[in-house]
Image: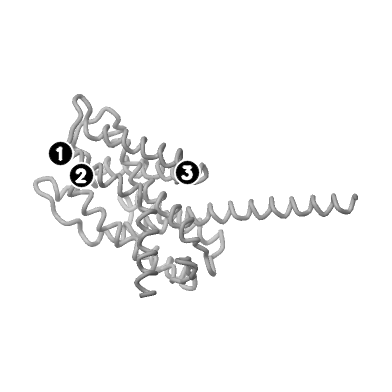
Amino acid sequence: MRVIKQLFGFGWEQALSCLFPVVIFASLALTQWVSVPFLPRYDLLLFICLWMQWGMVRSGLETIDELKVISLFHIIGLTLEIFKVHMGSWSYPEEGYFKVFGVPLYSGFMYASVASYLCQAWRRLKVDLVRWPSFWSVVPLATAIYLNFFTHHYWMDVRWWLAGLVLIVFWRASVTYEVGGVRYRMPLVLAFVLIGFFIWLAENIATYLGAWEYPNQTDAWNLVHVGKVSSWLLLVIVSFLIVATLKQVKGKERKSRGLSAEDRHKNRRKAL
């Protein structure tokens, strides 16, 4: 019974962390059958995402710092979308007023929702990093993974080399998290694979609901090729590395401020 209770607790915290992605999927499904006069579907999705983002910050479900991280992912995702649509990797065939180079602005929120999940889960499960690699190995690796999404159209695709580097760099790293007052530990590489796989499942649902369209889905919907798991896996790694790095920087700032406050208190006591 304790195992079942812990699994339920873990699932509940994960479900709460997925609130933003769930709203996006629900909106994709709803707008398949419900329309607003004179407002294209893509634009309706954009307004729903903006309203959801405002509501989460307003209600305290997300902090201002988390909003900054999510905004960064919005820019990163939209940049990637514009390039990929230009290269013909996928398309957004429906009309919309708020489209940039053929990409509806709501698409950036799909990447931002991944960052929202990571930030929420990090806080709710009290995630901590064990044997985290140095800044000088994490940042160049994340940068190389992101750039490969662009450069492989003009040069060789080195994703498997990068995946090998991920195994080497993070082989000893793990994450700890808390459920019901009990801390658990998971190898970081396994966490990457699990998140990437579930995002691939979510991608199948999203394309089925018309979020975007791959070339092989123009005439009829088909299952997204399983090879896309590697793409999502690498994208999840980039997302996790960015969030983890920012969390560490923020943690060091808090620690530094705390030490500074303690030093001031000690100096004040000495003066007295």
**Residue farthest toward the left in the current orientation of the protein:** 219
Q: Amino acid at mark 1?
A: Trp
Pointer 1 local density, CA inside 10 Å: few below 14, some 14–19, many at least 20 = few
Along the viewing direction, whichever of 84 and 51 lies nearer the viewer: 51
Pointer 3 local density, CA inside 10 Å: few below 14, some 14–19, many at least 20 = few
Q: Residue at x 56, y 59 (%)?
A: 135
Q: Amino acid at mark 3?
A: Gly
Q: Are marks 2 and 1 in contact (CB under 8 Å)?
A: yes
Circle 3 residue: 60
Q: Position of residue 236 (x, y in %)?
A: 38, 57
Q: Nearer the viewer, mark 1 or mark 3?
A: 3
Circle 2 residue: 29
Figure check: 83 above or below 228: above
Q: Are marks 2 and 3 in contact (CB under 8 Å)?
A: no
Q: Position of residue 36 (x, y in %)?
A: 20, 29
Helix, strand or loop at mark 1: helix
Q: Residue at x 41, y 49 (%)?
A: 116
Q: Residue at x 42, y 42 (%)?
A: 56
Alpha-carbon span between mark 2 and mark 1: 7 Å
Circle 1 residue: 33
